């Protein structure tokens, strides 16, 4: 082995491949069919088309692998091609790529799964970065993640939980599906509770926790979510649900509920800047129950770390909506779990929405997205019955909407045509109307007529959601436009960075400040120091001086749909720019419209809407097959 090579394969992956995964939210590719890399992959790429990192990695591998120190150019190009295909798969969120047959002529860089398992903890594993398993090609690391997670799931299903007679508590629910979810959460070591918006996932969870605390007062329960925003939403929803008089009447209220906190999975595991968890299999978490909300956002690596860190007797409850967006990073764990036949006994799907009545337009729109493979624009008109609008038309105020309201603004935009400047200005003006109540209450706050809590409440009524960051209808431009409208409404200087009413979002965890990625705040004069601008974070009930906030903080009148996941607003404006077509699909559209409780305004071309209705993300993964294999092995 070449002594000058002092990096491991894993560190090379960290530097030159995993970076692609970090950009997934902005570059997601939605495919109608599972991506299959066919025989054309075996054709050599021209050296000028091969990324530098792929060339460097194949050179590095040929050096550390003594058998291939003089790897011929043709085979080295093959190695580069496969590495490139795998990195592109990671960028899509796939843990592997599907192949019609095992790659040839690169055996010294490729383990077969049986050969890999036979190596045990041998250092030889460092010499072969790729792995072949039943029609799937992996980077070693991601196959190992799936295998480890599969083993932990299999062991959980073998755990025996004391069975409880729940007859005294079933009367708390009118919905039979919610009754089933209660029984699943109480009497199983592993539970999947899924459902669309308003089906009562949090309501059921509250009762599961209340009954467990009634039965086992000393039980240690952790409430977590994949992101800071989702954890805060979970906290707010739980505190509200714990105040339900029915819990008191049933004798299920526990003093701990007043202090029950939620946190991110990263914070639970003690994952620092280097991405290394403080808790793992050798140092497990000290909880009896771990509840994960918004589990659709759970990626493969994070799930593996979480399940690694639980003790054998720890119960796991996952809640989520598999129709929502998949995780930003590699994997779609919740969907994979639902594909395993043996896990169906652990799964309860809540079906009755309390948020939308049977004829609610938003609810009908949400159902339509997954009703057929390719719903059409005609289906949209017939089922959702939106109010057809033109830019400039008046829309009802929130107080006037008794059930729900869905408006559609068809944009004259296609793949080859752009919107005119005058049309864009009109769209910006139309979108700003949703913030008029917010602009007005800011004036009242400056005159000390209202409290900062009232300002925050009005701000949270409305949000603009977009698919991408760049472009005339992207995140950056819409935030700039809303900033200009706010400054004009309050007669402020246009060039000030910090100003009254600026909405901001934290883009990374800062444990020193006590803020998490996704936290949203409002810049206001402090109520006790009116001359000083600070940012108030409603979900944390915390003020932070603007000078202490990181430079990376972002304006947040508009959010990407990814960042909105886990949030709820009375009115949502969904803006679908034609240039975002490669990003759009059923999951993104469904997630966007279901953030709304009362009103949805959709700005899109008909072509873009039909595309979004037709495309569903299908991620390549072997996790479900690995779970089936692990279960078979454990039962033999």
Image (cartoon, rainbow, N blue to C red):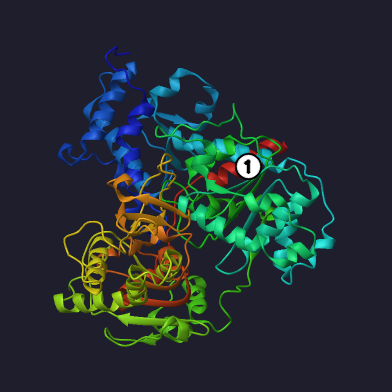
Other residues around mark 1 within 10 Å, as few (<14) / some (14–19) / many (≥20): many
Left or right of 312? Residue 65 is: left
Left or right of 500? Residue 244 is: right
Who's the residue at 23% across and 64% down the image? 480
Who's the residue at 28% across and 29% down the image? 57
Left or right of 366? Residue 475 is: left
Quarter that holds the N terminus: top left
> Looking at the image, is 98 positioned above or below residue 370?
above
Looking at the rendered structure, the secondary structure element under dot 1 is helix
Q: Nearer the viewer, residue 291 or 523?
A: 523
The residue carrying mark 1 is 153
Tell me where residue 267 appears, x and y as whole percent: 50, 40
> Looking at the image, is 546 positioned above or below residue 477?
above
Tell me where residue 476 appears, x and y as whole percent: 25, 60
Who's the residue at 42% across and 42% down the image? 101
Q: Nearer the viewer, residue 276 or 455?
A: 455
Quarter that holds the C terminus: top right
> Looking at the image, is 299 positioned above or below residue 131?
below
> Looking at the image, is 534 positioned above or below residue 465?
above
Q: How many marks?
A: 1
Tell me where residue 475 appears, x and y as whole percent: 28, 62
Tell me where residue 548 appears, x and y as whole percent: 32, 45
Let me know if residue 134 appears in the view: no
Q: Quadrant of residue 389?
A: bottom left
Q: Quadrant of residue 593?
A: bottom left
Let me know if residue 440 appears in the view: yes
């Amino acid at each position: 082995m070449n002594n000058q090579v002092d990096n491991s394969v894993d560190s090379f992956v960290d530097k030159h491949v995993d970076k692609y995964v970090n950009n997934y939210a902005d570059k997601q590719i939605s495919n109608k069919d599972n991506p299959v890399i066919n025989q054309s992959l075996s054709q050599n790429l021209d050296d000028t088309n091969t990324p530098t990192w792929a060339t460097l990695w194949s050179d590095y591998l040929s050096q550390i692998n003594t058998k291939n120190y003089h790897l011929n150019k043709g085979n080295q190009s093959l190695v580069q091609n496969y590495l490139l295909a795998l990195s592109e798969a990671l960028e899509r969120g796939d843990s592997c790529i599907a192949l019609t047959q095992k790659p040839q002529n690169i055996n010294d860089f490729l383990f077969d799964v049986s050969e890999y398992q036979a190596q045990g903890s041998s250092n030889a594993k460092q010499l072969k970065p790729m792995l072949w398993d039943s029609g799937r090609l992996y980077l070693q690391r991601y196959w190992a993640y799936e295998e480890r997670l599969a083993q932990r799931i299999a062991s959980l299903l073998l755990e025996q939980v004391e069975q409880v007679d729940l007859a005294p508590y079933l009367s708390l629910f009118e919905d039979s599906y919610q009754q089933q979810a209660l029984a699943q959460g109480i009497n199983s070591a592993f539970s999947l509770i899924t459902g669309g918006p308003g089906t009562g996932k949090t309501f059921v969870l509250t009762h599961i926790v209340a009954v467990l605390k009634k039965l086992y007062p000393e039980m240690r329960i952790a409430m977590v979510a994949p992101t800071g925003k989702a954890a805060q939403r979970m906290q707010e929803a739980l505190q509200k649900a714990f105040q339900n008089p029915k819990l008191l009447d049933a004798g299920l209220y526990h003093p701990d509920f007043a202090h029950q906190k939620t946190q991110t999975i990263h914070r639970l595991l003690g994952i620092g800047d280097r991405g290394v968890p403080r808790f793992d299999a050798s140092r497990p978490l000290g909880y009896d129950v771990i509840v994960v909300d918004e589990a659709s956002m759970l990626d493969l690596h994070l799930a593996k770390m979480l399940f690694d860190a639980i003790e054998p007797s720890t119960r796991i409850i996952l809640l989520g909506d598999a129709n929502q967006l998949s995780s930003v990073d590699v994997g779609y764990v919740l969907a994979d779990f639902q594909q395993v036949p043996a896990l169906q006994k652990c799964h309860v799907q809540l079906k009755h929405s309390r948020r939308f009545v049977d004829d609610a337009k938003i609810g009908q729109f949400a159902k339509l997205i997954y009703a057929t493979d390719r719903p059409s624009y005609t289906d949209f008109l017939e089922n959702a019955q939106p109010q057809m609008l033109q830019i400039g038309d008046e829309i009802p105020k929130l107080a006037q909407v008794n059930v729900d309201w869905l408006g559609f603004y068809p944009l004259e935009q296609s793949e080859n045509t752009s919107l005119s400047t005058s049309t864009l200005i009109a769209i910006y003006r139309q979108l700003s109307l949703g913030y008029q109540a917010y602009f007005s209450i800011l004036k009242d706050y400056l005159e000390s007529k209202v409290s900062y809590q009232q300002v925050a409440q009005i701000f949270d009524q409305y949000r603009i959601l977009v698919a991408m960051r760049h472009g005339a209808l992207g995140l950056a431009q819409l935030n700039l436009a809303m900033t200009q409208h706010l400054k004009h409404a309050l007669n402020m200087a246009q060039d000030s960075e910090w100003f009254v009413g600026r909405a901001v979002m934290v883009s990374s965890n800062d444990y020193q400040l006590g803020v998490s990625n996704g936290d949203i705040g409002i810049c206001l004069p402090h109520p006790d120091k009116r001359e000083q601008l600070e940012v108030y974070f409603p979900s944390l009930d915390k003020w932070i001086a603007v000078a202490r906030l990181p430079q990376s903080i972002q304006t947040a009148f508009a959010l990407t749909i990814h960042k909105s996941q886990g949030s709820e607003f009375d009115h949502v404006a969904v803006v679908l720019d034609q240039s975002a077509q490669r990003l759009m699909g059923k999951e993104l559209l469904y997630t966007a419209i279901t953030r709304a409780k009362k009103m949805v305004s959709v700005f899109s071309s008909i072509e873009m809407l039909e595309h979004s209705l037709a495309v569903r993300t299908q991620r390549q993964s072997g996790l479900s097959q690995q779970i089936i294999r692990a279960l078979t092995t454990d039962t033999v």
